[in-house]
C-alpha cells in the first residue's frame, strides 16, 4: 500500500497530473521513469538527455493500479511509463524515506549520550545506532579501539575516506617544542572549530587516544546549532550579521599560508545550521563601517560566551582506546589545560568527509549488513 | 611608502580613527596588533581572546610615523601598538595584495591558452604562471609528465592533498565491461561536472593520459562562469531559479548511495560563480508547483544548451604525458565519442582540494622558490 490516497487525474493547465493534493509537472514525472532502456542497470544513471525531452510534453492519460502500487502514464510523445507510487510518495513528503539521514537534534550540557563499544560495531544494528547518534548529536564516542600507533587510519576508513592536509593524513596532538599550532602545547583550548581557513573545510574530525598519563586535558564539546539558535532567539540582528558577514580566516605557518572567507554561521536550504566557522585566534573581519562592526563584535562576543558556557558544554576524559568522532561543521571543541610534565599524553587525529558516514548509514538502512563503507573494486 | 595618503585622527563617535577616507573601528584595529607578546611567533595565531577585549575600547591617540610606514595607537585600556600601514592599506583595498589569488576570467571557445611543459615547472616563475592561468581559466594543461602507471599521485601531490573517494585515490578511465559509470565506456559524454552528489564535492580534477591508441575521445571544457553569466544576461528569472532551487543529486551504484542537495549555480560573497553542479543523468528537482518548474526546466535546458555549445567549448586530444588540471566547481567537462575497439585508451584521474594550489601560489607570491606545496614535518 502507498501513502497516497484519493484519485488521480490529468491537469489540463500544466499538462501534468493531480495526485495527493499536488499538481505534478509532466517533465518531473517523465524524469522519474525507470524502464530498463531509460536507466543504466548498474549505475541507475539516465541513458537519455533530459534537455532533449519535448518542452511541451503533456500527460494524456493516467491510471493508478488496483493495488495502488503503480502509476501508469501515457505521455504526449508516445512514451508510456509505470512509476512506483511508494517512491513518488517519498518524494512528495507523504511517506518516510528509510534512507533519510536522521535530523540534527540541538543539545546542551544535560545531554545524555551512550558511549559505544568498538567491538560491538560489527553488528549492523549497533553501527546504525552509532551513526544515528552521530547525525543527531554531531558526535559519538567509541571505547575499546586498538591503540596501535597510526591504527586510527584503519578505524576512520571504516566510515569514509581520509582527508589529508598539510599536517599529513594523521596529526599527532602531543606537546611539542616550537609548536606550529597552539593545539600542540598543554594550554587550555577555548571552543573553536578546526581549519576554517581551508577550502573546503575538513568535515569530520576523529581524535584517538593512544596514551594519557595526565589529569586534566578533558575534551570539551558544544553544539554550534544550539549556540546559533540561542543567538537568533536573543537578537535577530546578531544572527543576521553572523550569517552574512564574510570573515577571512588565515593560517600563516612555516610551511604554508591558507586562507578562506566565509560567514561564522551558515544554514542549509532547509534552515538547519550546517557550517559553523569559529576560530578567534585567526579571524579577520573586513573594515566595515563602525556601526555595523559594533553589532558584529557584540554578536561574536556572545557566540564566544555561549561556546564556552558550561551550560552548553559536555566534558569527558580520553582513556587509551577512546575514539571521538565529531562533525567539525556543527560542533565547537576545545580542551581543559593539563600539565605536560605530569606524564605523556598522545592523541592522534584525522579528518574524513561528510559523505562517507552518510553512505554507510544509507546502505545499512536499506538492509546491507557490511559495517564498513565500501570501495569500488 | 604606503598607499594611504592624508591625515589621521581619532573619531569620537566610534572611538576609532579616520584614515584613508574610512572610519576604522577600535576593535578592528586592536585585533591587528602584531607585538611579540600578542601573536605566537611561529603560527602567528593570537595569544589572547578577542572576546575578552573591552567592548567599549577607544583609541585615545593616533600618529603616523614620518616615513608613513607605521601607525602608532594608544588605546583606552593602556595598550600601545604599532601597526604596519602597508598591511592596513591592503585590508582597506587601497593597495594590491601580492598574495591575492588571481581573479577568474570568463572565456569562450576563442580562448587562447598556453600549454605548459612539466619539465619547466621547477622554475618558480613558470609554476606561478601556470597557477595564474589555472586561477584565471579554471584549468591548465601540462605536457611531458612521466607516464608510469599511478605516477599521477606524485604529480597531483605537487599541488595539494589527494582527495580519495569510493573510487579510490586514483580512478582509471578506460572502457570496462559492466561499467559502474558511463565514463567507463566509449560513449560521448555531454558537458557535466563531477560528483555533485558528494559533500563536499571534490574540488579539482586531474586527468593524466598514460596511453591513447584511438582517434576521437577529445576532452571538452566549457566555462561555467561564462554560461552562468550568459544565462543571467538572457533571463534573470532563469538565473534566479538556478541559483535558488535545491536539487538532489544521487549516485546509486553497487557499493554505495551518495546524495547531496544544492542549487545548480552558487556564487561566492563577491558575486563570482564559485560552484556549478550539473549532472543531468542523476539530478532530481523537488516537486515544486508546475509554474515554477516550467521556468526551472527552461533554465536548465538553456544551461545544457550553452554547456554543449561549440561557441563556448574548447576541445583537445590527450597524448601520453598530457596532464589536465581543472576546477570542478567552475568548468563543465565532457568528451567526444571514440571507438574502444580501435585501440587502448587509458587515462588516470584523481581529485585534490582547492586550498593546495592556493597555498602554493601564495608561497610563490611572497618569494618562496619551492614549486611543491609543502607538508608540515
Image (cartoon, coloured by chain):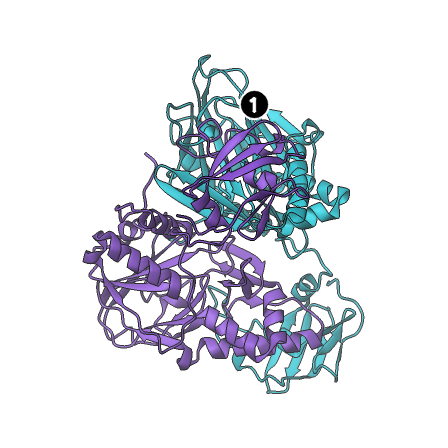
Chain colours: A cyan, B purple
Count of all numbered marks drawn on residues in the image: 1
Q: Residue at x 45, y 44 (%)?
A: B85
Residue B239 location, x and y as percent? 59, 72
Where is residue A14, by image quadrant?
bottom right
Residues packed near mark 1 inside 10 Å, few (<14), some (14 to 19) or many (20 plus): some
Q: Residue at x 46, y 61 (%)?
A: B329
> Disc 1 on helix, strand or loop?
loop
Residue A335 location, x and y as percent? 55, 26
Relative to the observer, which residue lies in front, B303 or A287?
A287
Residue B143 position (above or below residue A179): below
Relative to the observer, which residue lies in front, B336 or B124?
B124
Query: Which residue of the protein is positioned furthest toward the top in this rendering?
Result: A342
Where is residue A229, by image quadrant?
top right
Q: Which residue is mark 1?
A: A336
Residue A254 position (above or below residue A31): above
Left or right of A173, for residue B297: right
Q: Quadrant of the N terminus of chain A?
A: bottom right
Residue A356 location, x and y as percent? 50, 47
Amino acid at each position: 500500500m502507498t501513502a497516497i490516497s484519493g484519485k488521480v487525474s490529468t491537469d489540463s493547465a500544466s499538462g501534468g497530473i493531480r495526485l495527493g493534493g499536488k499538481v505534478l509537472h509532466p517533465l518531473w514525472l517523465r524524469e522519474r521513469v525507470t524502464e530498463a532502456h531509460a536507466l543504466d542497470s548498474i549505475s541507475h544513471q539516465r541513458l537519455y538527455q533530459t534537455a532533449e525531452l519535448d518542452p511541451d510534453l503533456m500527460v494524456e492519460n493516467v491510471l493508478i493500479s488496483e493495488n495502488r502500487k503503480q502509476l501508469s502514464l501515457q505521455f504526449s510523445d508516445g512514451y508510456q511509463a509505470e512509476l512506483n507510487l511508494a517512491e513518488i510518495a517519498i518524494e512528495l513528503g507523504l511517506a518516510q524515506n528509510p534512507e533519510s539521514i536522521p535530523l540534527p537534534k540541538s543539545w546542551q550540557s544535560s545531554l545524555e549520550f551512550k558511549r559505544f563499544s568498538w567491538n560491538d560495531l560489527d553488528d549492523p544494528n549497533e553501527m546504525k545506532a552509532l551513526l544515528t547518534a552521530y547525525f543527531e548529536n554531531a558526535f559519538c564516542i567509541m571505547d575499546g579501539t586498538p591503540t596501535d600507533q597510526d591504527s586510527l587510519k584503519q578505524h576512520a576508513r571504516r566510515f569514509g575516506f581520509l582527508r589529508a592536509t598539510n599536517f599529513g593524513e594523521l596529526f599527532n596532538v602531543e606537546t611539542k617544542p616550537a609548536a606550529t599550532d597552539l593545539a600542540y602545547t598543554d594550554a587550555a583550548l577555548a571552543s573553536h572549530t578546526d581549519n576554517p581557513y581551508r577550502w573546503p573545510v575538513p568535515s569530520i574530525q576523529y581524535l584517538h587516544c593512544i596514551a594519557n598519563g595526565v589529569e586534566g586535558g578533558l575534551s570539551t564539546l558544544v553544539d554550534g546549532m544550539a549556540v546559533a539558535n540561542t543567538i537568533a532567539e536573543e537578537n535577530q540582528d546578531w544572527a543576521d550579521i553572523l550569517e552574512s558577514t564574510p570573515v577571512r580566516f588565515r593560517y600563516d605557518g612555516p610551511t604554508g599560508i591558507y586562507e578562506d572567507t566565509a560567514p561564522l554561521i551558515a544554514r542549509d536550504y532547509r534552515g538547519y545550521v550546517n557550517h559553523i566557522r569559529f576560530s578567534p585566534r585567526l579571524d579577520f573581519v573586513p573594515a566595515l563601517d563602525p556601526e555595523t562592526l559594533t553589532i558584529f563584535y557584540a554578536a561574536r562576543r556572545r557566540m564566544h560566551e555561549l561556546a564556552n558556557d558550561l551550560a552548553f558544554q559536555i566534558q569527558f576524559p580520553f582513556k587509551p582506546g577512546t575514539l571521538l568522532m565529531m562533525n567539525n561543521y556543527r560542533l565547537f571543541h576545545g580542551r581543559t589545560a593539563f600539565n605536560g610534565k605530569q606524564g605523556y599524553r598522545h592523541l592522534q587525529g584525522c579528518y574524513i568527509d561528510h559523505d562517507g558516514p552518510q553512505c554507510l548509514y544509507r546502505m545499512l538502512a536499506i538492509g546491507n549488513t557490511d559495517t564498513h563503507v565500501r570501495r569500488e573494486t
